[in-house]
Amino acid sequence: MTDDLVVLLDAHRQPCGTAPRLSVHGTETPRHLAFSCHLVDSAGRMLMTRRALAKTAWPGVWTNSFCGHPRPGEHVDDAIRRYAPHELGLDIGDLTCILPDFEYRAVDAGGVVENEVCPVYWARPVGVPAPNPTEVMDLVWAPIDDVWSAANRTPWVFSPWFVDQVHALGKRPFDTIRWAS
């Protein structure tokens, strides 16, 4: 059963095994595959979420719309479509990879290490968020320019992967979005 396994990666970003999801977020976290997704609505706002206090890593911290892990043999796009209803109670459309090579390693105040190869996507929300309280304790739709400014001025408020993504994406990352009519 692969329902709660993550894909471990070697130094060349190639799969080299699997491990239970709960075992790969501790003080000795192996490198593994993940994803981040930014939901952007037609008004040019981004959905920011605050991680539930029960989360193992970075509890209570503001971050991008949602993150997760593909299962062994699952394409990242399919994992994102699976996670959106679980974490946010909505579907997504117009899924687009915007940082295919993003990776990071960070250690939170409790010593929990994140060590992920984490392609970054944006998508359009389909529906109204109904967050899963075990994943998300709060959310807000905010203008992208305001979010980017806040991440640059007060990075300690946000997850380190989100701040790194802001820097990697540059000043106006979603200006080229073509909205479907």
Image (cartoon, grey):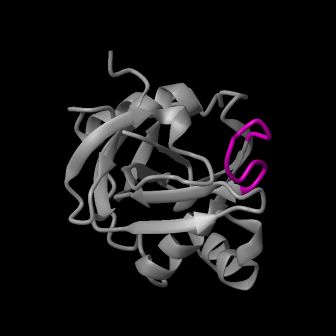
The structure residue drawn at horizontal position 44% and vertical position 53%, both measured from the top left corner, is 30
Left or right: where 143 falls relative to 8: right
Find residue 49 and report its horizontal and vertical position in percent.
Answer: 67, 49
Kindly indicate the quadrant of the structure image that contains residue 28: bottom right
Q: Nearer the viewer, residue 126 or 10?
A: 10
Q: Nearer the viewer, residue 109 or 82?
A: 109
The structure residue drawn at horizontal position 52% and vertical position 74%, both measured from the top left corner, is 164
Tell me which segment is drawn in magenta.
52-61
Magenta stretch containing residue 162, yes or no? no
Left or right: where 52 falls relative to 113: right
The quadrant of the picture occupied by the N terminus is top left
Q: Main secondary structure of the magenta part?
A: loop
Answer above or below: position of 165 versus 32.
below
Find residue 162 and report its horizontal and vertical position in percent.
Answer: 56, 66
The structure residue drawn at horizontal position 43% and vertical position 57%, both measured from the top left corner, is 116
Kindly indicate the quadrant of the structure image that contains residue 107: bottom right
Extreme residue toward the front, this view: 28
Kindly indicate the quadrant of the structure image that contains residue 134: top right
Q: Is residue 181 visible?
A: no
Left or right: where 171 falls relative to 139: left
The structure residue drawn at horizontal position 61% and vertical position 33%, both measured from the top left corner, is 129
Number of marks present in the image shown: 0
Q: Is residue 136 visible?
A: yes
Left or right: where 94 falls relative to 48: left
Answer above or below: position of 168 versus 69.
below
Find residue 143 and report its horizontal and vertical position in percent.
Answer: 62, 66
